[in-house]
Amino acid sequence: MSRKLVDLSIYLENDVASDPPGLQPQISYFTHENTYEQIAPYFPGLQKHDLPDGEGWAVERVQLSTHNGTHLDAPYHFHSTMDAKTGEKKKSSTIDEVPLDWCFQPGVKLDFRHLPDGHVVSAAEVEAELRRIGHTLKPLEIVVVNTRAGSRYGSPDYVSAGCGMGYEATMYLLERGVRLTGTDGWSWDAPFVHTAKAYGETHDASLIWEGHKAGRDIGYCHIEKLHNLEALPPDGFFISCFPHKIRGASAGWTRAVAIFDDRLMS
């Protein structure tokens, strides 16, 4: 058996541009040298030199939102209801309610790195890319989108880089049974700075978050802030992206991984 794993996740870390200003994660590191004070109250009389090498434990305190780092968005993030187009409109699923079988499926990669920043991908462009790679979509496949944003991670322009998936492109996938998608951009949609310009010209609010809002019609999830998608072929791999189980939440962090396994592919 031959197995290869490709890490598709970014780090949670300080001082790297992964979110707009004010929304970044904040991590405080407590090392072996400065945690004696945390341990001592549990053991009256304990002196620092009593500990092996005078060292305590290492621990971190993390302040973040469910949308920091590589994370899986639940339908609840997009809108309060979902599945209106199926005739079964209902309350949107939170992250703890997302079916686990959505989160481990064969993967398909669409390469849109050539598209300009702010471009809104159409259904026709999705169809053309599928035709180029010779792939016919199957229900529950996980479709990930490689954009220019992936090459800009950690740079100040990361949150404004890359194309986004529009309503019709997203619906094209959902109508063919896809229920989980992903992007290496900050958002599944076109970056806000570009959408704001289009809205300023048209005052058409349907342009705002149009890809996300497809979840009103057919509930789905997507992964944001993927990494290393350029290392993937168009298909022939599985993606594992089980989210952290946060009750009633709109998203959960995930360690997304691509798995190439001869046994799984047979």
Image: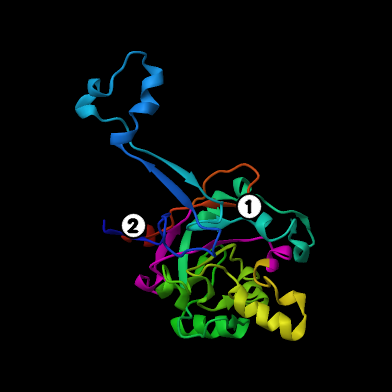
Q: Is residue 78 left or right of residue 34?
A: right
Identified at 56% across, 51% down, the residue is: 65
Label 2 and label 1: CA atoms lie apart by 34 Å
On the image, the x and y values in percent for residue 246 come to 58, 43
Closer to the camera in the image, 262 or 57: 57
Q: Is residue 234 visible?
A: no
Q: What stretch is highlighted in magenta?
A: 213-241
Query: Residue 261: which quarter of the image?
Result: bottom left
Disc 1, SS: loop
Quarter the C terminus occupies: bottom left
Q: Which of label 2 and label 1 is nearer to you?
A: 1
| Relative depth, front residue between 46 and 11 | 46
Residue farthest to the left, as pictured: 53
- On the image, the x and y values in percent for residue 210 come to 68, 72
Q: Earlier in the sequence, mark 2 or mark 1?
A: 1
Residue 250 badge: 1
* Residue named by callout 2: 263
Residue 237 within the magenta-colored segment of the rendering: yes
